[in-house]
Image: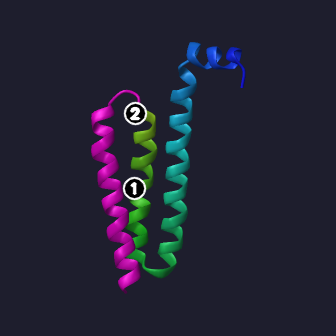
Amino acid sequence: MTADQDDHEDADPGLARERTSLAWTRTALSFAAVGGVLLKRDVAAGLAVMTTVPVIWEVGRLANHHPGRLRLVTVMIVAVALVSLAVAVLR
């Protein structure tokens, strides 16, 4: 990577926002895939994970505007995912 490329990235901080948004979209898609798999094994756990998908997607859209809420929602999503996984594994 040359110095010109580094300067270009520093001059356009919007690229970081775009990458963050894309990362949240990939996370939402991953949760949707895991929720789909869980639906086959345990409907309650699968639905719990699937209900977090729109929340994750929306958080990704709002991540740049409300960083404090981002942490709270992230913790809630991880908690729901862990509970859903525990329910699926223990049944």
Res. 42 image quadrant: bottom left
Q: Secondary structure at mark 2?
A: helix
Q: Amino acid at mark 2?
A: Leu
Q: Is residue 13 positioned above or below 89 on the image?
A: above
In the image, is residue 84 part of the stretch drawn in magenta? yes
Q: Are marks 2 and 1 in contact (CB under 8 Å)?
A: no
Q: Amino acid at mark 1?
A: Thr
Quick check: is 48 in the magenta stretch?
no
Q: Residue at x 43, y 70 (%)?
A: 46
Q: How is the image coloured?
A: rainbow
| Residue for point 34% across, 78% down | 87
Q: Which residues are magenta?
A: 63-91
Would you call the spot at circle 1 few (<14 residues within 10 Å), some (14-19), or many (20 or more)?
A: many
Mark 2 or mark 1, earlier in chain: 1
Q: Which residue is mark 1?
A: 52
Q: Which mark is residue 62?
A: 2
- Total of numbered circles in the picture? 2
- Where 53 falls versus 83 (above or below)? above
Residue 9, how many percent across, how many down? 61, 20
Percent coordinates x, y for residue 64 in the rendering: 41, 28
Q: Quick check: 48 above or below 88? A: above
Query: Quick one: 75 or 9, which is closer to the camera?
Result: 9
Instruction: Please state, as top left, top right, bottom left or bottom right, where the N terminus lies in the image.
Output: top right
Q: Position of residue 16 (x, y in %)?
A: 53, 28
